Every structure is written in structure tokens, then in C-alpha cells.
Image (cartoon, rainbow, N blue to C red):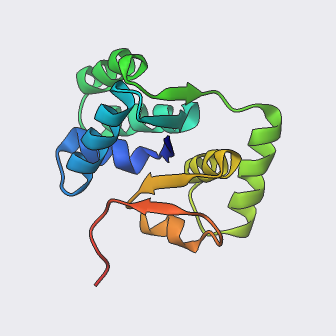
Amino acid sequence: MKTRVLDSWAILEWINGRQPATNAVAHLLSLCEIGAARLHMSAINVGEVYYFLRKEYSQELAEAWRSSSPTLPVTIEVPTLEEIWDAAILKSLHPIAYADAFAAALAQKYSCALVTGDPELRSVAGLELDWIGPLPI
């Protein structure tokens, strides 16, 4: 069974309907619905999606995400204290956003790929990426 971690970049691209991320995320969600895949997402990244939608779009869109996110076939994980330390270590070692460190740490926890197109995450040595962003030029 395919296990993956979603970062906020993947979800925001999916919500905005930007390709190729939209089709890739939709495909992963459909695989989860039939039991052929597992998706995880850090609660930190779920909150990041919320604040971005609220700041850049509207309170209504952010609230729609807030109410719909628990209905997705994605396991939303609240980090433990140990996982917070793991993310903090990743942040201290790599030029990534703090929330991205939680997504990366969760992918490392499950020894699986992180679904993203965020170029910052390419800097994390040894992190497997399931790249759904535009191809670099």
C-alpha cells in the first residue's frame, strides 16, 4: 500500500485547481478512498492551509477548509513533543519554513515520500519527494 505525506503546498495547489498538482492530489485521494493508499498530514500544515486561505482569500474559504478537511481520506496528525523536536532539528539544519519541517518530519516518521512541489523541500537531504509541482527549468 502506498503511504504518502501531504504538505500544505500540495493542498493549496489542489484547492486552487493548479496543474499538475490538482490531478495528482485527486488521484491520491481516490486511491485512499478505495484503500489502495494512505495519506497523512500534520495538523500544523492543516492550520497553515487555513491561515493562508483566510489571509489571501477569505474567511469563508478558510472556514470551508476547516469544516471539510476532517472529511478527507487523510489522517491528520497532531505532533507529539518528540515530533516537535524532530521538526525543530530539521528547521535548524535546512533552509525551510517551520511548517514545512513538520511535513518533512512526518514523512521521515513513516519512511515515505512527501507530496509537494515546494522547491524549499528539495534542500532536505535524504527526504524522498513525490514531486507534483512544475518541472524546474
Rendered location of residue 113, percent (x, y): 53, 55
Query: Residue at point 33% right, 18% down?
Result: 68
| In the image, residue 18 above or below residue 41 | below
Kindly give the residue lying farthest to the bottom in the view shown.
Answer: 137
Q: Residue at x 57, y 36 (%)?
A: 44
How far across and down, in percent of the image, does residue 80 sit? 76, 31
Residue 105, compared with residue 82, is above or below; it is: below
Residue 61 x, y percent position in the rendering: 25, 26
In the figure, 94 relative to 82: above or below?
A: below
Quadrant where the image shows the C terminus: bottom left
Q: Quadrant of residue 63?
A: top left
Residue drawn at x 47%, y 36% is 39
Seen at 50% across and 45% down, the residue is 4
Q: Is residue 110 left or right of residue 128?
A: right
Residue 48 point in image, percent of width and height: 47, 38
What is the count of numbered marks?
A: 0
Q: Nearer the viewer, residue 7 or 64?
A: 7
Q: Of 39 and 67, which appears nearest the observer? A: 39
Left or right? Give the position of 48 relative to 79: left
